[in-house]
Amino acid sequence: MPVCAQGHDSADDEFCDVCGLAFEHATVAEPVAAQPEPAPESRPCPVCGASLEARFCENCGADSLAATVSPEAAPAPVAAAGPVAARTWSVTVSADRAYFEKVKAEGGPDAEPIEFPPFCPERHFPLSGAQVTVGRRSQSRGILPDIDLTGPPEDVGVSRLHALLVAGPAGWSVVDMGSANGTYLNQTHTPLPANEPHPLAAGDEVHLGAWTTLTFRPDEG
């Protein structure tokens, strides 16, 4: 329907029915095209980096609304093909006497044969790639962990494939791989549930076996 310059609707297309204004001064309202709704933006899983379509990650099961490691406590991600942390981190493996005494105290008579190693130099492993395996190698079973705790000295309480370290946009996480003796984070007395990622922060300690401790730190520089 024509609309005159005064804004009146008119059935006549030559003169306005309301004010009589000629329609050479009128305009016809153009319909506004409906704008398509933007497609929902995909976002990466805060644990494994896979694309999220809903709240829970279909790749690792992580809850995207749960608290994650803060940027100050974890390495920042880089735009790369895989979920690799930009800042270089490393793991220091050491014999932890305090953890050993705790294991002995809680282990009862079965813990008596366990001995703390008289000498165990610290070992350092850089973290790189999307994941790092932790355990003791077994040639017969084809298990060759990235962080090999075979020794000497050897902590027999560490499983062949004990844990997995996973890099994601929020930083590194540790996953217990169903180990025989469990994986413990910092001073907790309860082992981490198997096959679930747990975010790590700078200075965190992961305890394995009878006396093995992994300490996580960002490299200097």
Image (cartoon, grey):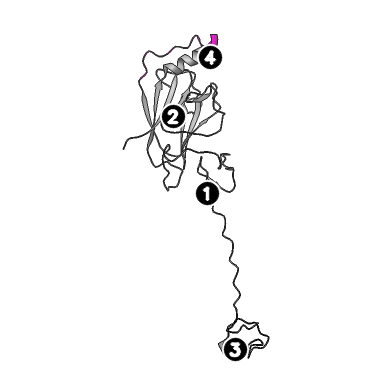
**Disc 2 target residue:** 204
- Seen at 54% across and 27% down, the residue is 192
In the image shown, does 167 or 135 lie closer to the viewer? 167
Horizontal side of residue 212 vs 2, given as left or right = left
- The image position of residue 82, as x and y in percent, is 46, 44
Q: Amino acid at mark 4?
A: Glu
Q: Amino acid at mark 2?
A: Asp
**Disc 1 target residue:** 43
Q: Is residue 178 magenta?
A: no
Q: Main secondary structure of the magenta part?
A: loop
Q: Report the quarter where the C terminus lies.
A: top left
Local SS, label 3: helix
Pointer 3 or 2: first along the chain = 3
In the image shown, does 35 or 143 lie closer to the viewer? 35
- The image position of residue 124, as x and y in percent, is 36, 28
- Seen at 35% across and 35% down, the residue is 219
- The image position of residue 60, as x and y in percent, is 56, 39
Q: Report the quarter where the N terminus lies.
A: bottom right
CA distance separating discs 4 and 1: 44 Å
CA distance separating discs 2 and 1: 27 Å
**Disc 3 target residue:** 23
- Seen at 48% across and 16% down, the residue is 102
